[in-house]
Amino acid sequence: MLRNVLLALMCVFFVVAPRAGFALEVDVSGGRINPLPIAITPFLTGEGAEEAGATLNEVIANNLNRSGYFTTLPQESFIEQISDFNQEPRFADWRQVQAKALVTGQVYVEGGKLRVEFKLFDVNSQQQIAAQQFTTSAKNMRRIGHLTSDAIYKALTGIDGYFDTRVVFVDESGPKDRRIKKLAIMDQDGFNVRALTDGREIVVTPRFSPNSQEITFMAIGEGTPRVYLYNIETQQREIVGEFANMSFAPRYSPDGQRVIMSLLTADGRNSNIYEMDLRSRELRQLTNTPAINTGPSYSPDGGQITFESDRGGAQQIYVMNADGSGQNRISFGNGRYSTPVWSPDGKYIAFTKQASGRFSIGVMQPDGSGERILTEGFHNEGPTWAPNGRVLMFFRDSQGENGGPQLFSVDITGYNEQQVPTPGFSSDPAWSPRLN
Amino acid sequence: MMGRMAGFKIAVACCCFLALAACSKKNTPDLGADGGVGQAAPGSIREFELVVGDRIYFVVDQSDLTPEGTEILTKQAAWLQQYSNVMIQVEGHSDERGTREYNIALSARRATATREFLIAQGVNPKRISSIAYGKERPAALCDAEQCWTQNRRAVTVITSGAS
């Protein structure tokens, strides 16, 4: 809903030059990333648009630098000072400062709204390779910065960007034995943080619906701990089924029509995975073993589900068909594997691994092959994928009585680990799909 | 930027208030100047916590009752038989060395094992509710086995019928 309102405010034109023969692509296929030097010139601003210009520059530079695929050149090093948006840049000057790509832009007030324009150039070929124009209100400026960042990222890497996205997470405050845990939402860069619950109940494991408008989570408060749905726009909340026993570990299906979750068995000893159709409220049992079966996550085509189970004695990752048939263990390494999450492109399953008292985040292929650890330490847990499948976010708990969890992101190569800024301690991040 | 900071300050103010509210009803016994174990009145919450013992501990990743655990639960059951108006909730907990969803399920197993033992000892099932907290409410705060041992627990909390 929010998405539609915002898009209605904006006129978007997208222009990309023919890609044939275009050689400027960041190599993101191999292991190590060699960041591409990019010059982002100060946006030219009309009267009343100065703050918007500064915001755009800051948002775009921050996004591109944090991605690890780009390094923005210091503005002090620039030889040419752009003074006319429509004039051809002096490419020789930009070659001299080692810029491979160049961004120019302007923002000015027009009819009570702000008009934002930018251009992206390949310095070597002297070609304009992307340009966009937006008309919107000042409060959307960070979002325009994210959309611009996505356009630059896509034009230079060939991969969809992930900057115009949000993260839902759990905001933690107070002492460790009486933690207040609120459902919270923010932009992927840590801005616009907003609490969605009041902290009277313990909120855990929030997950986005595929349209980014709803969140499913578990809350431990008065009564039986249960899975809930929350609509971000209307702030309405509902229970997913009045089950006699606890429900937990929810996640949406890729079409948003169903939620899969664990239900505690009637004898209180085991947990099995169930699927609920959100329209008919029909419940279907998918696992039936005397074990803890939890952490279910659909493949992007909805045909399969990965989950964790201790049916073999300790937590391991399994894959089954969406109807519950064909349950097969896929993790066989040394240690315990849990919190499996299927990547948006279907190629990988991310997980938490516990071995030798250490907690790692890793990825493997859905057949269990090609296991790769991305980050390892005292306590890393709960990976979530950026919608382009290139970046993962997770939380890392720090030791000590006054320690607490923080959010981090890491490239799928295992490089470029970055802390995600949040107001306080934070855990259980879930990355939204692309908003636009 | 300003809006974000202002929002954060408001959030901090709310948290402080809630933290204070939580302090006033913490369930660990407070041995103040006015009394030790000996002064716990018969049938009181204090007696249950300090004389009977309100909690039992579990082995890593296990929900089987230990011999020490069954000994305490036997005493709990006898006390509960004596004070038959008392209602209880069994809280299951795990240590922090596990993943969140699994620990919720594991702590549910611990609460169930505890509840079932009390029922087998003759306590009316209707008097016992249970809840799983996973790793969300550690009792001891350090990053060593000495604390994790105290956090893998089931706590019998009196919800009504005793003061």
Image (cartoon, coloured by chain):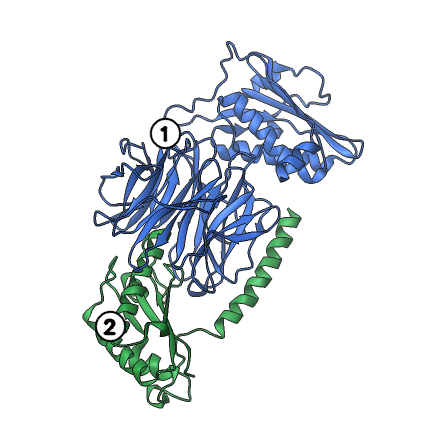
Please say if the residues under marks 2 and 1 sit with CB atoms less than 8 Å apart: no
Which residue occupies 29% across, 63% down? Answer: B110
Closer mark to the observer between disc 2 and disc 1: 2
Residue bearing mark 1: A347
Residue A419 visible in the current orientation: no
Q: Give the secondary structure at mark 1.
A: loop
Q: Quadrant of residue A306?
A: top left
In the rendered image, residue B90, in percent from the top left (x then y), is placed at 35, 69
Residue A191 seen by the camera: yes
- Marked residue chain, label 1: A
Q: Could you give the CA–CA distance between mark 2 and mark 1, rounded to whole angstroms?
A: 50 Å
Tell me residue B162's x, y (percent). Answer: 41, 83
Q: Amino acid at mark 2?
A: Ala
Subunit that carries the residue with mark 2 = B
The chain coloured green carries which letter? B
* Nearer-the-camera pick, A27 or A344: A344
Image side of residue A386 versus residue A269, left or right: right
Q: Is residue A214 above or below residue B118?
A: above
The quadrant where residue B82 appears: bottom left
Q: Which chain is blue?
A: A
Q: Position of residue A315 (x, y in %)?
A: 27, 48
Amino acid on which the number 1 mark rests in the picture:
Lys
Label 2 belongs to which residue?
Answer: B120
Q: Quadrant of the C terminus of chain A?
A: top right
* Local secondary structure at mark 2: helix
Judged left or right of residue A287, residue B25 is right
Is B94 in front, or is A323? A323
